[in-house]
Image (cartoon, grey):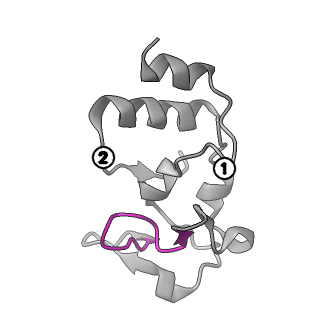
């Protein structure tokens, strides 16, 4: 059984999560209440969560692998279901292609 097959069968929990979603570009909505120092604007003007030099969301606690602003996290992060279809698709894609950047936004 390869890694992708194991991932599909694995129960993804807080303790087994790789926080891959914290490497996605998180597009903010006007009603998000994220502190300004944790956000940035892309060249096209899109308001997003800032990333550190390694490409991780600046709100991620890298030691604990959890969100430092969990209670006030962006709406799109609230809608991202751990172990859900989008989560598993991202994990599969990461396993196939390695590190990459995509936008996480509500559609």
For label 1, the SS is helix
Q: Residue at x 32, y 66 (%)?
A: 54
**Residue 69 magenta-highlighted:** no
Question: In terms of secondary structure, what is the magenta stretch mainly?
Answer: loop
Closer to the chain start, of discs 1 and 2, is: 1
In the image, farthest residue toward the left? 43
From the viewer's perspective, is residue 22 above or below residue 53?
A: above
Q: How many marks?
A: 2
For label 2, the SS is loop
Q: Are marks 1 and 2 in contact (CB under 8 Å)?
A: no
Q: Is residue 101 left or right of residue 4?
A: left
Dividing the picture into quadrants, the one containing residue 81 is: top right
Circle 2 sits on which residue?
Answer: 99
**Residue 50 magenta-highlighted:** yes
The numbered disc on residue 33 is: none
Circle 1 sits on which residue?
Answer: 79
Q: Residue at x 61, y 19 (%)?
A: 9
* Viewer-closest of 58 and 74: 58
The percent position of residue 83, horizontal first and vertical second, equals: 64, 35
Kindly report the distance in space between the C-alpha atoms of the residues bearing marks 1 and 2. 22 Å
Q: Nearer the viewer, mark 1 or mark 2?
A: 2
Q: Residue at x 56, y 21 (%)?
A: 8
The percent position of residue 53, horizontal first and vertical second, equals: 30, 73
Please report the bounds of the magenta region as a residue range: 49-61
From the viewer's perspective, is residue 11 above or below residue 28?
A: above
The percent position of residue 1, horizontal first and vertical second, equals: 47, 11
Q: Is residue 5 left or right of residue 52?
A: right
């Amino acid at each position: 059984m390869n890694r992708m097959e194991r991932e599909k069968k694995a129960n993804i929990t807080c303790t087994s999560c790789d926080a891959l979603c914290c490497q996605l570009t998180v597009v903010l909505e006007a009603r998000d209440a994220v502190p300004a120092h944790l956000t940035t604007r892309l060249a096209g003007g899109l308001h997003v969560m800032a990333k550190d030099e390694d490409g991780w969301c600046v709100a991620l606690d890298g030691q604990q692998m959890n969100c430092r602003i969990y209670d006030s996290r962006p709406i799109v992060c609230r809608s991202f279901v751990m172990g859900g279809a989008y989560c598993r698709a991202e994990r599969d894609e990461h396993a196939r292609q390695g590190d990459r950047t995509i936008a996480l936004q509500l559609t």
